[in-house]
Amino acid sequence: MSILYHSTRDNNKKLTASQAVLQGLAEDGGLFVPDSLPVLDKSLEELKDMDYKGVAYEVMKLFLTDYTEEELKGCIERAYDEKFDTKEIAPIREAGGAYYLELFHGSTIAFKDMALSILPHLMTTAAKKNDLKEEIVILTATSGDTGKAALAGFADVPGTRICVFYPKNGVSKVQERQMVTQKGANVRVIGIEGNFDNAQTGVKKMFNDEALKAELKEKGFVFSSANSINIGRLVPQVVYYVYAYTRLLKDGNIKSGDKINICVPTGNFGNILAAYYAKQAGLPVNKLICASNSNRVLYDFFKSGSYDKLREMDENGAFSKDRKFILTGSPSMDILISSNLERLIYHIAGDDDKKNKALMEQLNKDGAYEISEDMKARLDDFCGGYASEEDTASKIASLYKECGYIIDPHTAVAGYVYDEYRKNTGDDTPALIASTASPYKFAKTVMCALDDKYASVDDMKLIDSLNEVSGVAIPQAIDDIRSAEVLHDIVCAIDEMPEEVRKFLR
Ligand SMILES: *Cc1c(COP(=O)(O)O)cnc(C)c1O
């Protein structure tokens, strides 16, 4: 069956998958969604005998129907290779009464590698298929992890350039060093004086700036996106949920047809939306547990049906307090506008583009919207929770004490939220927790959670301390940045972003 894509704000204009991958974001500001959500055409029993690449093909072929088998398999082959430090690609570790799905074994040690190691191949294949003449310019806003993973994916890929914007004071030391040391003739890294939402809004603005686009087209450039709004990011993320289920099956931890819960540390809502698509594709999933840090706009949304980036919900369920943007130890989730939620809103509105568009316009204008009662009823697949900084630190410490297993702060947010969910509901369905980063990426926060004495120790020294207490080998990505030279030092104001892009392309 062939699947076409259209904007969440306009059901009528159809694109093929490869066109949607190339374009990234719809012209009307909406996100591309498939005409219908595909269903697995092989049983999970059959898939359990395949390796990661095999499962990846079986899942991705359902969504990317205009890629030939040869093209898709070629992309998969080039993506999931020795860049990953384990043959399993996404191994599972049982600890503290849950299954942690480790998604950080790629080259930049965060889960973004799972999709960003294949996106450049999907995109260059799409460019060939569609006879694209222009050079593709990837514009990316990052809360820390996407930036590096996108840079690593696109560095020196012929026919592409990549420009990454990150909040100058909003990422971890390791994240920043990883980005500013990025090599490659086609890359540019820029810090902005603002937070992630400012960066993301600035990038979206450039995507919708017709004059800028026309000016650059004349010079032979066309914009695309490596952010999780790109369908080429989302689809590869559906794979590992299906894969994880089949590994639990294979290892005898669940039986055929058993349901699982999935808990995901959430920021832009891409990762958990992929789990939702996996459920729609036939994966036996009970609850999707959306875990937030102190920036708990999604928790408030799942509780109340109101999305409000300006005000926070109080104990009585009223949106009475001003919401502040909080910098936490899980920076990749410091987000108040979760872009991918738009796709879920569209689906629970019954694939109603007009309803969705009205809500998104309201969000733009008033900073808030409320969904209808029947939309709320369709949110039943989801459940929200959040963890404070103390909760997160306590989860890191307790899991280490119980099992000797060290998780990163993002994963710990999910671990804590899952424990609370289980305690409060008594639901002990086997649970998969998306483990989204290596603890080495956030060594400071992790070590301080284990003992305050590390607060005064230099970040880079803590890498060795973490190595001693965890017994886990220091990843190549960390070794690399210790000696690497800083190659990028541009910092700009939010309104200077378009000018910086022009300079880069000059
Ligand atoms: C990006 C990221 C997240 C959030 O994922 P979304 O798809 O944006 O919800 C969580 N943890 C880590 C480590 C990340 O890099």
Image: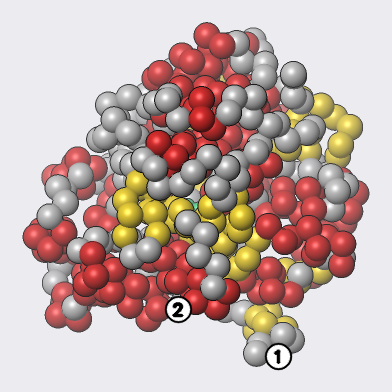
Q: Say whether residue 94 is left or right of residue 310.
A: left
Q: Say whether residue 16 is left or right of residue 465.
A: right
Q: Is residue 186 above or below residue 270?
A: above
Residue 425 found in image quarter: bottom right
Instruction: Look at 53% across and 17% down and name the residue there.
Output: 72
Quarter of the figure that contains the N terminus: top right
Provide residue 39's location: percent of width, then percent of height: 68, 32
State which tag comes first along the sequence, 1 or 2: 1
Instruction: Name the amino acid, label 2.
Output: Ser
Q: Say whether residue 397 is left or right of residue 129.
A: left
Provide residue 213's location: percent of width, then percent of height: 68, 33
Provide residue 48's location: percent of width, then percent of height: 45, 30
Instruction: Name the amino acid, label 1.
Output: Asn
Residue 412 found in image quarter: bottom left
* Mark number displayed over residue 316: 1
Is there any visible trace of residue 459 in the rendered image?
Answer: yes
Q: What residue is shown with label 2?
A: 388
